[in-house]
Amino acid sequence: MKVFVLNGPNLGRLGKREPSVYGSTTYEDLAALCVKAGVELGIEVDVRQTDSEAEMVGWLHEASDNGYPVVLNAAAWTHYSIAVRDAAAQLTAPLLEVHISNVHKREEFRRHSVLSDIATGVIVGLGVDGYPLALKWLADNAAG
Ligand code: DQA
């Protein structure tokens, strides 16, 4: 099974970006963590990050066309992008929404996600550990 782990804007700056909120793990560390989890779980993990909404929409179309499950941290797009939602809604395999921080403990505008009601499940506030947890769930529940 192949899984896409897709990350939205500013997540390439993990480690440097507001470490009190997002921790000191860099994006490269996060990508390596996901690939390692994939090896341990016996699934192929393709980790990507973009600051371009068009690129993210294209990757979601690619996942949809290939029937891949997606672990998605859409970052700020989570809160307002109907384009990302519409692309994610086309997925036929499970969609797991992940956020590093607990968005419900932060600003009011972060409490609403345009993705959660079309996601299979949501993991928030567990730091980067949310990603391998999402991959474990997919390995157990979305085999194929
Ligand atoms: C985030 C939370 C979002 O509100 C924010 O815009 C991000 C990261 C998280 O992983 O905690 O960029 O998705």
Image: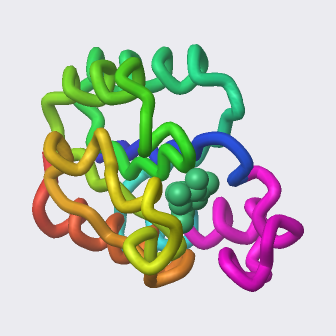
Predominant SS of the magenta segment: helix
Q: Quadrant of the C terminus?
A: top left
Q: Is residue 74 above or below residue 26?
A: above
Report the number of numbered marks: 0
- Furthest toward the front, the residue is 108
| Residue 121 shown left or right of residue 29 in the figure | left
Q: Which residue is drawn at the image coordinates 28% and 46% (left, top)?
A: 1
Residue 66 place in picture, x, y as percent: 29, 22
Residue 136 forms part of the magenta stretch: no
Q: Is residue 92 above or below residue 76?
A: above
Examine the rendering and report whether any part of residue 132 can be seen: no
Q: Which residue is drawn at the image coordinates 16% and 40% (left, top)?
A: 118
Residue 13 forms part of the magenta stretch: yes
Residue 92 place in picture, x, y as percent: 14, 30
| Residue 34 shown left or right of residue 4 in the figure | right
Q: Nearer the viewer, residue 62 or 96?
A: 96
Q: Quadrant of residue 32?
A: bottom right
